[in-house]
Amino acid sequence: KQEVTQIPAALSVPEGENLVLNCSFTDSAIYNLQWFRQDPGKGLTSLLLIQSSQREQTSGRLNASLDKSSGRSTLYIAASQPGDSATYLCAATSGNTGKLIFGQGTTLQVKP
Amino acid sequence: GAVVSQHPSWVICKSGTSVKIECRSLDFQATTMFWYRQFPKQSLMLMATSNEGSKATYEQGVEKDKFLINHASLTLSTLTVTSAHPEDSSFYICSPGTNYGYTFGSGTRLTVV
């Protein structure tokens, strides 16, 4: 059974810092790995999707990596801004059904 | 991209009443819809998977008689929370899954008083 864990649970950094969020999963036979952003009381916004055959994906200041052998993914945020404050969720898909297994999330606060 | 419209955005109901949540696919046909819920300060957990024209499949620990799912057409899936109790207060959100870019509905905040 796939389990997804995220650390830290919460993170507070000053504006401008680079930061890394961690995600680990127990079953390396994943179909893909995704990172989402969730603002308080809101739905989910997909940030990056890494297929199982890929090692990383980049979008603007965001870079996500995937290491299936170690069961880990990281989300790197460069030059953080107060607008980046949100909860970041990683989710693994086992098989191509679209069923997502979510981690508990990391709540990020970027202070001006 | 695929757009899913979810209603209502929030609802407050009394204990014992039923609440229906709708997810409509606006520009595509969804044969499958995943329903997740999120308790405060917890992550999203898959509740059930609805399939157009057939019975939904429920995750372990989710009562199928309490959470009624209907997927009668390719553009509409509904989740009805029957005889709601305060412990059902949660954030419910739908997604059609992999074929549609993992788009999600905007979510429904249910509060049972």
Image: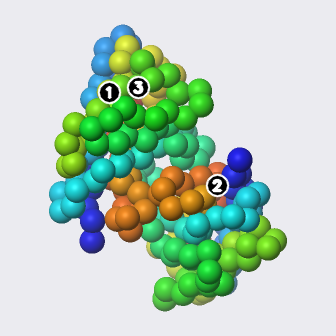
Q: Nearer the viewer, residue B10 or B60?
A: B60
Mark closer to the chain start, 3 or 1 = 3
Residue located at (30% from left, 50% from top): B31
- Residue A59, x across and y down, in percent: 49, 86
Of all residues, the one furthest to the top in this rendering is: B16
Residue located at (42% from left, 46% from top): B34
Task: Please tell me the numbered disc located at residue B67.
Answer: 3
The residue labelled by disc 1 is: B80
- The reply to whether callout 3 and callout 2 are in contact (CB within 8 Å) is no
Residue B113 occupies quadrant:
top left
Check the picture and name the quadrant holding the N terminus of chain B.
bottom left
Q: With respect to residue B60, does A90 lie above or below?
A: below
- Chain of the residue displaying label 1: B
Question: What is the secondary structure assignment of the residue under circle 1?
Answer: strand
Q: Nearer the viewer, residue B102 or A36?
A: B102
Q: Give the left or right position of residue A76, taking residue A83 as reference.
A: right
Q: CA distance from mark 3 to mark 1?
A: 6 Å
Amino acid on which disc 1 is placed: Thr
Amino acid on which disc 3 is placed: Phe
Question: What is the secondary structure assignment of the residue under circle 2?
Answer: loop
Amino acid on which disc 2 is placed: Gly
Q: With respect to residue A90, does B16 lie above or below?
A: above
Task: Please tell me the numbered disc located at residue A103.
Answer: 2
Residue located at (48% from left, 73% from top): A47
